[in-house]
Each structure stands twice: as structure tokens, then as C-alpha cells.
Amino acid sequence: MPIDVTSLYDRRADNRWDRVCVGDILERVTWSRPDQVAIVGWPGAFADPACERLTYRQANDIVNRFANGLLARGLRRGDRVLLVCENSVEAYLAKLATAKAGLVAVPVNPSLAQSATERAFRHGWFHSGDSCVVDEDGLRIMVDRYKDIIKSGGENVSSLRVEAVLHQHPDVAKSAVIGLPHDQWGEAVTAIVVCEPGRQPDAAELIAFCRERLAGFESPKAIVFADALPETVGGKVLKYKLRLQLAHHYAHTATP
């Protein structure tokens, strides 16, 4: 059966299994699992306490009300809706509602400075800052953010790759890997680790764990334990803050 990806609105309320557009995501699952939890917001990631935890039915109802409200304001199919907001549960639902109404969501990060915006759109192209590889089948595989790639001893190290290995350790709840200034290596691969409750692995143990699974130049030169990582409301680690806080970590430390 052909899948309908072109008619985004005014469709019959049947053949719901062929609804694959972004505006239909919640509606599809609402019919099969209405009371299953769909969205759980972190503290600070929602404005209204009612949006802290939503089932598919509840989220779909909010999206429908928002979508109808946009159309009631006189917006027409294809109009652009500027969303000036941080990442949050409400913002995500607003994007789905915009799509469901046949409108185009244009999210704007209010924390993005004008200079950063100009750099991102220089020469008429959008520079995402993402580093990817393309395999033989044309699949694009995310390597890292360019600004997060660590240049250590003449080698490029993907922070995401090192973090993925650290997260395999049962005692590690969260981790962030950054490059810090080092006289010998240029940048030293450094892991900031938040442990699972009641666990406290040894730094040497974690480094050995990584060396068993990574090349020597990729493995952390040091482990820094922390109670928490600086994050946005969406859970993105603010690595620039870690680089500032630990900029002098190796100033008086000899490492192998």
C-alpha cells in the first residue's frame, strides 16, 4: 500500500497506519497507546507543571488545541510561525502543532548572539558545525561537533566516541569528554564523570577500561569526578563551561 506523505491535512480519519508526517506522530500512537507516557520533562524543561509528564493522549490534545488556535488567528497553510523559545516540552509541542496545522515552524534560539548567527550563515550556506562521515551506502554518520573534536598529539579524537565507551561502564551515569591545554599533547583528552548513586570507581580503573576499547591516543589522560554536568534544559552538556572551569587542570600535572 502506498504511504501518503504529501497530503498533510484534510484527510479522512482512516488508514491511520500510513500517517508518517511529523504532525501525525502523536495522533498515530494516541490511537494505539493513548495512556502510555510519551514525554517526561526534566526539572526546568517545562513552564507549566501540567507538562512535566504527558501521555500520548494528553500531548495530542495540547497539540490539537495549539494547532486550532493558530488557524483561528487567521494563519494560512504554509505560513511561517516564528518560535522564540528555549528547548522545552512546550516548545516541542508547539513545533508539532505548527506542523499539524500545515504551517512552517521557524525556531529561533534566543541565546544565539548575532555574531554567532552571522558565522553560521556565512557565504549563503548554513554551517551546522557537525562533522560526519558518509559510508559506501550514502549513510551519514555523526562523528562529533567540530568544536568538540580534540587535537591531541597530532591526532583528532572524537569526544562522542570516548563518551560512548565510558557510558558502557556500569558505574558511570554521565560523562563529558573535552580537550584541555597540555604542554606535551597540545590538548589532553579529559573525561568529566558523574557516577551512578552509591558507586565510586577509581580513575585508573576507568582509564584502563577505555584503553581496552580505544586507541591509546583516544583514551583519557585524566578523569575528573563531578556531582553534575552543566546542561541546558534539554540536557545538552555545556562543554565550553567545563573547558573554562578546568583550563588549568594540567598546569602543574605530569601525565603519561
Image: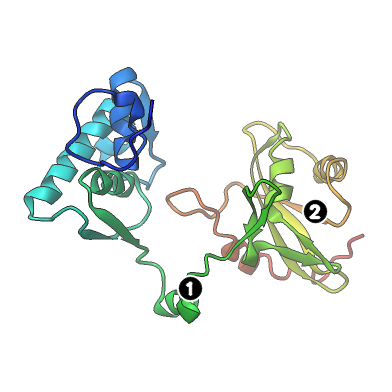
**Residue at disc 1, secondary structure:** loop
On screen, residue 133 versus residue 17, left or right, reads right
Task: Judge by depth and name the residue closer to the eye, 202 or 100.
Answer: 100
Q: Tag 2: Cα neighbours inside 10 Å, few (<14), some, or many (≥20)? A: many
User: Residue 128 placed where, x, y %?
Assistant: 52, 65
On screen, residue 245 versus residue 102, left or right, reads right
Residue 249 visible in the snapshot = no
**Which quadrant is home to the C terminus?**
bottom right
The amino acid at mark 1 is Trp
Cα–Cα gap, marks 1 and 2:
35 Å
Which residue is most to the right?
256
- The earlier-in-sequence mark between 1 and 2 is 1
At 73% from the left edge and 64% from the top edge, which residue is drawn? 150
At 46% from the left edge and 75% from the top edge, which residue is drawn? 121
Task: Judge by depth and name the residue closer to the eye, 77 or 25.
Answer: 77
* Quarter location, residue 15: top left
User: Residue 87 placed where, x, y %?
Assistant: 38, 52
Task: Judge by depth and name the residue closer to the eye, 222 or 86.
Answer: 86
On screen, residue 26 versus residue 66, left or right, reads right
User: Residue 197 placed where, x, y %?
Assistant: 62, 33
On screen, residue 116 versus residue 110, left or right, reads right
At 89% from the left edge and 61% from the top edge, which residue is drawn? 255
**Residue at disc 2, secondary structure:** loop
Q: Which label belongs to residue 220?
A: 2
At 26% from the left edge and 42% from the top edge, which residue is drawn? 8
Q: Which label belongs to residue 125?
A: 1
Task: Judge by depth and name the residue closer to the eye, 162 or 129.
Answer: 129
User: Residue 64 placed where, x, y %?
Assistant: 19, 37
